[in-house]
Image (cartoon, coloured by chain):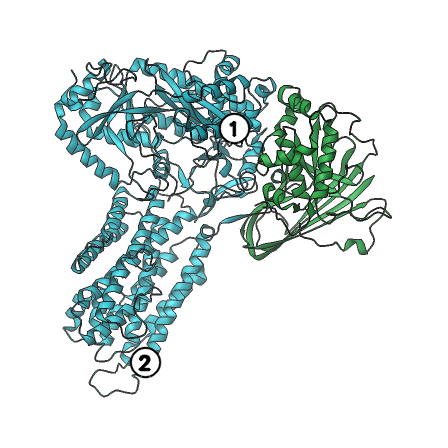
Chain colours: A green, B cyan
């Protein structure tokens, strides 16, 4: 499967911005069976400087500076990603979840040591005891890790209400847990917080889901903007992705941009600007299979607030 | 025997007494010092100390305490009696802290490099992964090795058996070297004989080593180094400005720096200047709002990227705070063996990191004997003394420690040694902590001989500057007289004569401009107030309306005068007191003098000591007390005006004519022009018999009565007053004088805008073009030509001049210090 993705972010400023520094996490990752074939970033106005670096988690970041006055900043990321059709990474059987926490705590193999860092608090995920309490019914004693995680995911999907208006990028995981509503970022944070509060290693993953559904299937929620889901570490099997927003295991309709501890490690675009005062952000994402060339209508991107 | 001077309570033997083991017999290295003190006597010491304390106050040596009612600029509490350390003992300390610096530097290098220590299990991974001070964006970024721990501070305490122990390491931006230097200057100054007799090792060479090390970190031949401060509200801002001046660095705030093409630049009025080295006093996470904490206003957006590109060196390296944690202490002996192949020569105080099961269990069992602290910063937790806990509190902390044990450390409570502290002629033993300093010179480590001693405020175990403790000098004694050393280069070295002005950061230019404005505004307000206050008490009805018109010059939006009826003399009196003393009114004298103090404080490293002292005196003179009699207000005003005159005298006579002076003088001329316009418009709005005395008042306010009398005897005529106060370019208080000088000063600026210069010249031409002879004022008692003639034109001209000058000021602000008023804001994330 091959996808072409156009991710457009537009900042409209109320007063002109004289100078801005920005970092973008907009280049899809490459790893076995998931290869970023092509990626370009168009920024208007034209940046005075644009450089790439690889961050701590292996994501490629792009840093750019704009030093001419502007009322609007438009960032368009165009990517092509090829996915191999492979069997699911999810194993048939997995160790009891308590055993997994024990392995994380004690084993020091490089991959487990790397996973170990995703057990701790991070700037946006500092789970209190209520997260452990919420997760408890799914994590009965001795239950295999994968089974427990699938159950927790299903519960989050069922018990939380998708509501783009109920949260913002500033809403804390605590508030989301209390109000039982939010968007994909919030559900991913909730699940990561639950897993970590049990001593399990969990990553926050950002990416895209397919915009135009396959014939006969409904359009997926969150498809108009960038998406987020969760990855949990299972010794022996590695990192296993799961999407609480759709209650599904990502395979052929998800493309991964970046991963880290929480949203703060990989927010698609962040910046520090001089001037501007208030701003409005419009995000539009279009992800289509490459074989199917976009028609005239498809280029009119739907506009949605992230 | 201990002399009477130092009669101190006997030690009970449970702590180490620095002065005398048994409280009776001096330790030998103290003898010459104590003999010298004895020779001087208690009274003489008290007299000298009083003088020193005045100097501390006047020089603005401060340590700001958060939440202190005295606010910022609290004088630093210094004790005159130094701590004496023998040469032999110092050698042990020096070896120990240098070894520690080497070790900690290697650990940092590994943490931000290969992370071999964590991979091999020699350093628990939690100390990185659970630690918010581990800055992931800096991992794998190569920086000069000598920048990791350019400066390290090690806090030491002495146990009852006489051994020194490490209490804490300060690894990211340690404070105290500047205070140590200032303490040395003050104490050696009041005790010159004792200082000479004791053969004290000098500390100046330490600062030379630091300066050389800083400039040595740069790649370029002619590097520029700056000291990055969080700003005047920081607790140790005094030290930042003091060190910047002493080390020859430009003092900057985050807003003074900008990034272009992955390089750091200093914004100056001369343009952008590249920066090679940043000595930072801003905490790790706050240094870059783009890649570190997005809520920081203190840093430079893009700094991490500039560091990653290798275009700037930050000292200490960003992220060095990761080991500023007691949690690392239990692992140091093993790490010393691995990395240095040595055993640790200075032990750390007994520390348990609860991330290890056995340590956690031990701590939970012995909670009464330890102090529990957060393992990582930013948790907002104060140390908890286990012994003092109520059952309920204890249960709460135990629960927390069990939930996340790796977030806690426990330390043994150390019985600190005591040294004598002088207090109003009496001497008391107080617990002490010695902060020592080590510099990485790039080809070796240099320790400051001595350091900064901090003593507890009361008899107790907690030593904290934030809790009002004091500092002491530490004298390391030599067997032979030490080499005198000065920061100035040796006389034999030839100096290249140069007259190029030092670069002026835009923020400093902005502050200097406002310093000139606030000083002049204070003076204008004080002059108006004095004229009003000396008259309001005896004012008859007619006179009162004159005074009210003059009061109109304040153009106050905060006036307390009633609007419903004609104000009474009493009401005007209250208004004048409010104008003088109400700090909440932005147009009051007190508020503007307060601004002089605030802006002056932010410019400290650029003002002479005389000027700084004058600013402190000025703020004291304007302090009004509720109980003052009305007559005392005028006296206070007089005092305040004298100081303001002294200030403008220094400004004129003692500052080189660089860009800084230009900005300050332009600020002053601008403000005087604005007040002059307001005052002249009182005349231009028309006079009648009742308000005729206004002419006299205005002459007095402009200090021009004598000149007027000499020219015109006593005949008060509006046209003659206008000539003197508006058009006469030889009168330094006339409006034309201000505009002419503004144009002259502004025209000297290399980057001035011709259009803005022309605006000033147009204003001047307007004034020069006014032919006063054609203006007919309706004279009292004389037959009135309808409405006079030319008076309305005069008013319009004055108004226009005012508008021209103000718009000029706005353009100058925008051109030279626009950024200073614009905070960068984070988008996307926060």
Q: Chain of mark 2?
A: B
**Residue B1 or B55: which is nearer the viewer?**
B1
Q: Which residue is mark 2?
A: B790
**Both labels 1 and 2 in a single chain:** yes
Question: How far across and how far down the image is residue B678, in percent?
Answer: 32, 68
Residue at 66% from the left image edge and 34% from the top image edge: A135
Confirm whether residue B534 shows in the render. Answer: yes
The single residue placed furthest to the front in the displayed view is B391
Q: Which mark is residue B399?
A: 1
Confirm whether residue A29 shows in the render. Answer: no
Q: Callout 1 environment at 10 Å: few (<14), some (14 to 19), or many (20+)?
A: few
Question: How far across and how far down the image is residue B586, in percent?
Answer: 34, 58
Question: How far across and how far down the image is residue B282, in percent?
Answer: 45, 37
> Which dot, 1 or 2, sits closer to the camera?
1
Name the element at disc 1.
Answer: helix
**Residue B676 or A305: which is nearer the viewer?**
A305
Residue at 29% from the left image edge and 38% from the top image edge: B61
Q: Chain of mark 1?
A: B
Residue at 37% from the left image edge and 20% from the top image edge: B414
**Residue B37 or A235: which is nearer the viewer?**
A235
């Amino acid at each position: 499967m091959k996808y072409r993705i156009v991710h457009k972010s537009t900042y409209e400023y109320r007063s002109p911005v004289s100078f801005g520094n920005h970092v973008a996490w907009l280049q899809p990752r490459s790893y076995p069976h998931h290869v970023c074939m092509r990626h370009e970033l168009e920024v208007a106005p034209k940046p005075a400087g644009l450089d790439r670096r690889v961050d701590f988690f292996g994501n490629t970041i792009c840093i750019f500076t704009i030093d001419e006055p502007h009322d609007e900043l438009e960032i368009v990321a165009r990517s092509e990603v090829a996915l191999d059709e492979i069997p699911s990474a999810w194993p048939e059987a997995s160790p009891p979840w308590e055993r997994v926490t024990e392995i994380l705590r004690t084993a020091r193999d490089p991959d487990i040591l790397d996973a170990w860092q995703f057990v701790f608090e991070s700037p946006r995920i500092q789970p209190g005891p209520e997260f452990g309490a919420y997760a408890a019914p799914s994590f009965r004693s001795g239950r295999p890790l994968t089974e427990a995680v699938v159950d927790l995911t299903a519960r989050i999907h069922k018990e939380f209400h998708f509501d783009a208006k109920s949260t913002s990028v500033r809403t804390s995981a605590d508030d989301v847990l209390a109000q039982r509503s939010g968007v994909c970022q919030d559900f991913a944070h909730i699940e990561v917080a639950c897993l970590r509060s049990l001593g399990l290693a969990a990553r926050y993953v950002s990416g895209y889901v397919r915009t135009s559904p396959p014939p006969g299937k409904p359009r997926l929620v969150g498809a108009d903007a960038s998406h987020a889901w969760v990855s949990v570490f299972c010794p022996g099997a590695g990192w296993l992705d799961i999407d609480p927003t759709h209650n599904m295991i990502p395979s052929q309709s998800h493309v991964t941009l970046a991963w880290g501890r929480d949203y703060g490690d990989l927010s698609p675009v962040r910046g520090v600007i001089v001037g501007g005062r208030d701003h409005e952000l419009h995000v539009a994402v279009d992800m289509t299979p490459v074989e199917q060339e976009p028609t005239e209508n498809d280029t009119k991107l739907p506009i949605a607030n992230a | 025997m201990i002399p009477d001077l130092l009669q101190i309570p006997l030690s009970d033997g449970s702590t180490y007494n620095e002065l005398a083991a048994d409280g009776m017999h001096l330790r030998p290295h103290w003898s010459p010092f104590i003999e010298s003190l004895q020779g001087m006597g208690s009274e003489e010491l008290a007299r000298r100390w009083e003088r020193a304390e005045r100097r501390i106050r006047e020089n603005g040596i401060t340590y700001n305490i958060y939440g202190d009612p005295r606010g910022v600029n609290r004088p630093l509490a210094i004790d005159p009696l130094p701590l004496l350390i023998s040469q032999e003992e110092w050698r042990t300390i020096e070896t120990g802290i240098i070894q520690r610096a080497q070790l900690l530097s290697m650990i940092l290098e590994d943490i931000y490099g290969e992370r071999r220590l964590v991979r091999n299990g020699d350093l628990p991974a939690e100390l990185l992964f659970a630690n918010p001070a581990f800055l992931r964006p800096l991992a794998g970024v190569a920086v000069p090795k000598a920048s990791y721990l350019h400066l390290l501070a090690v806090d030491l305490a002495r146990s009852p058996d006489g051994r020194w122990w490490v209490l804490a390491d300060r690894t990211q931006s340690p404070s105290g070297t500047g205070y140590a230097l200032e303490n040395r200057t003050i104490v050696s100054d009041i005790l010159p004989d004792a200082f000479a007799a004791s053969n004290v090792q000098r500390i100046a060479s330490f600062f030379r080593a630091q300066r050389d090390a800083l400039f040595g970190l740069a790649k370029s031949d002619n590097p520029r180094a700056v000291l990055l401060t969080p700003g005047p509200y920081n607790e140790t801002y005094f030290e930042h400005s003091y060190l910047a001046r002493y080390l020859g660095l430009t003092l900057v705030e985050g807003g003074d720096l900008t990034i272009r093409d992955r390089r750091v630049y200093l914004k100056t009025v001369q343009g952008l200047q590249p920066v090679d080295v940043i000595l930072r006093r801003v905490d790790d996470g706050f240094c870059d709002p783009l890649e570190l904490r997005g809520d920081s206003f203190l840093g430079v957006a893009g700094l991490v990227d500039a560091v990653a590109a290798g275009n700037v060196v930050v000292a200490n390296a960003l992220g060095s705070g990761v080991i500023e944690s007691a949690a690392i202490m239990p692992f140091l002996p093993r790490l010393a063996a691995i990395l240095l192949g040595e055993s640790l020569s200075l032990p750390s105080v007994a520390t348990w990191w609860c991330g290890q099961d056995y340590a956690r269990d031990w701590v939970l069992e012995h909670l009464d004997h330890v102090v529990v602290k957060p393992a990582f910063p930013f948790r907002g937790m104060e140390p908890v003394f286990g012994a003092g806990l109520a059952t309920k509190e204890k249960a709460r902390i135990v629960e927390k420690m069990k939930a996340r044990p790796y977030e806690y450390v426990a330390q043994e409570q150390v019985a600190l040694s005591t040294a004598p502290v002088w207090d109003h002629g009496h001497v008391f033993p107080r617990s002490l902590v010695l902060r020592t300093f080590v510099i990485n010179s790039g080809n070796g480590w240099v320790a400051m001989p001595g350091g900064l001693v901090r003593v507890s405020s009361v008899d107790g175990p907690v030593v904290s500057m934030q809790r009002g403790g004091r500092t002491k000098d530490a004298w390391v004694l030599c067997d032979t007289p030490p080499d005198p050393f000065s920061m100035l280069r040796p006389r034999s070295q030839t100096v290249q004569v140069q007259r190029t002005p030092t670069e002026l950061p835009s923020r400093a230019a902005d502050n200097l401009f406002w310093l000139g404005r606030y000083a002049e505004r204070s003076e204008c307000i004080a002059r108006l107030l004095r004229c009003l206050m000396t008259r309001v008490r005896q004012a008859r009805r007619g006179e009162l309306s004159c005074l009210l018109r003059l009061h109109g010059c304040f153009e106050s939006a905060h006036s307390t005068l009633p609007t419903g009826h004609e104000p009474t003399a009493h009401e005007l009196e209250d208004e004048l007191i409010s104008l003088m003393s109400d700090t909440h009114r932005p147009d009051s004298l007190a508020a503007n003098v307060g601004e002089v103090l605030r802006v002056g404080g932010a410019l400290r490293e650029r003002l002479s000591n005389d000027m700084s002292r004058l600013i402190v005196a000025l703020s004291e003179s304007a302090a009004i007390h509720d109980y003052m009699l009305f007559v005392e207000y005028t006296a206070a005003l007089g005092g305040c005006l004298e100081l303001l005159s002294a200030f403008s005298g220094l400004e004129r006579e003692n500052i080189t004519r660089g860009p800084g002076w230009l900005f300050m003088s332009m600020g002053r001329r601008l403000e005087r022009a604005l007040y002059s316009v307001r005052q002249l418009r009182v005349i231009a709005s028309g006079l009648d018999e009742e308000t005729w005395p206004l002419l006299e008042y205005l002459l007095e306010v402009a200090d021009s009565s004598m000149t007027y009398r000499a020219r015109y005897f006593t005949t008060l005529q509006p046209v003659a007053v206008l000539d003197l106060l508006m058009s006469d370019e030889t009168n330094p208080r006339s409006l034309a004088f201000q505009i002419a000088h503004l144009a002259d000063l502004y025209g000297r600026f290399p980057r001035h805008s011709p259009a803005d210069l022309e605006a000033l010249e147009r204003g001047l031409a307007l004034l020069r073009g006014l032919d006063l002879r054609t203006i007919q004022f309706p004279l009292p008692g004389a037959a009135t030509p309808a409405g006079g003639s030319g008076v309305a034109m005069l008013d319009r001209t004055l108004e226009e001049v005012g508008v021209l000058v103000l718009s000029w000021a706005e353009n100058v602000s925008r051109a030279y210090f626009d950024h200073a008023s614009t905070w960068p804001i984070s988008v996307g994330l926060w």
